[in-house]
Amino acid sequence: SSLLSVLHITKMLNNEVFLAFPPVNRFCAASNNRTGFLCDDKVSCVPASQVCNTVSNCRSGEDEQEELCGDLPRSLPGHLVFRCSNPAYWIYADQRCNGVNDCGDCSDETGSLAACPPCGSEWWNCSPVLYEYCSCVPRRLCRDGIQHCHSWSDEYIC
């Protein structure tokens, strides 16, 4: 009886009872407060983009299991996935608002879908020349003799 309080009866078919454990909450915050996947040890938090990358980051390898990685992105928990404005594309949730144009159309960096904060202190706000960036360029690129912003502000003001 106590076992049944932990387990849920999910289906009865031909007088057989199928029992399933309630879903485990795998959400956690990895380094830099990025979205992560909680390992079975309930301590280790794997950044979303390191789940299903063929490298076991969890001690028991649960971040690479077939049921999790077999049909990407559908098999992943929703909190690990960010859907780009183009429905054919998706990225891992920890790649949203990382300053890089991972979706290819900047929907992971700009607009209401991404809901990113303004450029951080390590970034310069401008209209980038390069396809790699969307609305900010890394400050390490400032005054390096190469145009990264349409206005050249990365070379003269930054």
Image (tube, rainbow, N blue to C red):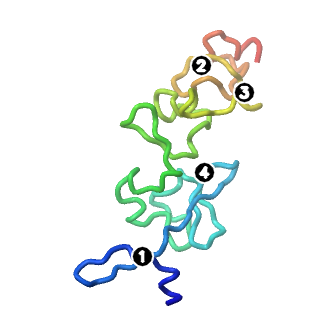
Going by the numbered disc 3, the residue's amino acid type is Arg
Residue found farthest to the bottom: 1
Going by the numbered disc 1, the residue's amino acid type is Ala
Nearer-N-terminus badge (2/3)? 2
Number of residues whose C-alpha sits closer than 10 Å to that of mark 3, classed few (under 14), some (14–19) or many (20 or more): some
Q: Is residue 85 above or below residue 6?
A: above
Residue position marked by numbered label 2 in the rendering: 128
Query: How far across and how far down the image is residue 126, in percent?
Result: 66, 18
Q: Is residue 143 left or right of residue 5?
A: right
Residue 35's label in the rendered image is: 4
Query: How far apart are labels 1 and 3 at the CA level?
Result: 51 Å
Residue position marked by numbered label 1 in the rendering: 20
Looking at the image, which residue is at 68% across and 25% down? 141
Query: How far apart are labels 1 and 4 at the CA level?
Result: 27 Å
Looking at the image, which residue is at 56% across and 17% down? 129
Mark 4 against mark 2, which lies toward the viewer? 4
Query: How far across and how far down the image is residue 40, in percent?
Result: 57, 72
Going by the numbered disc 4, the residue's amino acid type is Thr
Nearer-N-terminus badge (2/1)? 1
